[in-house]
Image (spheres, rainbow, N blue to C red):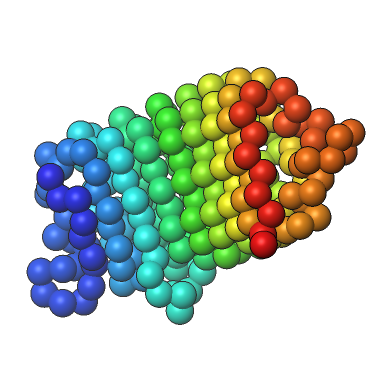
Amino acid sequence: MLPFFTISKKQGYESHQLKYLNKLQGKLQIHGLENVESKEEAVEVSLAGKEKLTELVLVWDDKNCSPEVQAEVLEGLCPSKYLERLEIRGYRGKRIPNWMTGKHNGRPKNLQELTFRRWTQLGPAPDLGAFIHLESLFLSDCNWDALPGNMEHLRSLKQLDIQSCKNIRSLPKLPKSLEEIEVRYCSDEFTQSCVTTGDPNWQKIEHIPKKTIKFDT
């Protein structure tokens, strides 16, 4: 097990140090991804070959990394198809990797929990239609102006947590499978709409048994 690894330019901490550690299991958290400079270098990390990992956290710590380079690096960090929980933190790229949209055969097909934290690119959230087994989705400090429009197809989704996403104004149609939703510290307009009887956002969460709505005060 190697629960935490920070990539840097120092000898012994380069990204290729992870290449042959394919027997790693459990959780792996990788920081310092701003020090990975190309898709080829990211592929060398060999995440797809680490089939015993069940949980992966990918973190960009430095905001000065080019969005174009980040996009290439995330494309090369395709996890194992056996991964169950994934968190991506600090991503500023302008596109979503093919393995997240279902255009990559080696993608994590049975992902159950997905967390996006501090995604600062504008626009809608990524299309999650490929993750049909997803049970929990957590969004925190993301700049998206909308959630994915096809979320009703995530028929295994039970928990949705939206925290400090200030640009979101409306909810898409949500799956009937949802058992719990939390909306915390988003815009007052959006939060109010979720508790106002008859509002379209209220109507989309009316069927969910457990609702936690907190204002940014």
Q: Is residue 118 above or below residue 113?
A: below
- Identify which residue, 183 or 54, lies in the foreground: 183
Q: Is residue 199 left or right of residue 191?
A: right
Can you see residue 38?
no
Q: Quadrant of the N terminus?
A: top left
Can you see residue 120?
yes
Residue drawn at (63%, 39%), measured in percent from left and top? Answer: 212
**Percent coordinates x, y for residue 214 in the rendering:** 65, 49
Q: Is residue 45 left or right of residue 119?
A: left
**Percent coordinates x, y for residue 151 in the rendering:** 65, 32
Residue drawn at (15%, 50%), measured in percent from left and top? Answer: 2
Q: Is residue 189 left or right of residue 4?
A: right
Residue 180, image quadrant: top right
Residue drawn at (43%, 36%), measured in percent from left and top? Answer: 113
Residue 110, image quadrant: top left
Q: How many marks?
A: 0
**Percent coordinates x, y for residue 94 in the rendering:** 58, 61
Q: Is residue 8 left or right of residue 64?
A: left
Residue drawn at (57%, 65%), measured in percent from left and top? Answer: 120
The residue sitting at the front extreme is 217
Q: Quadrant of the C terminus?
A: bottom right
**Percent coordinates x, y for residue 87 in the rendering:** 41, 48
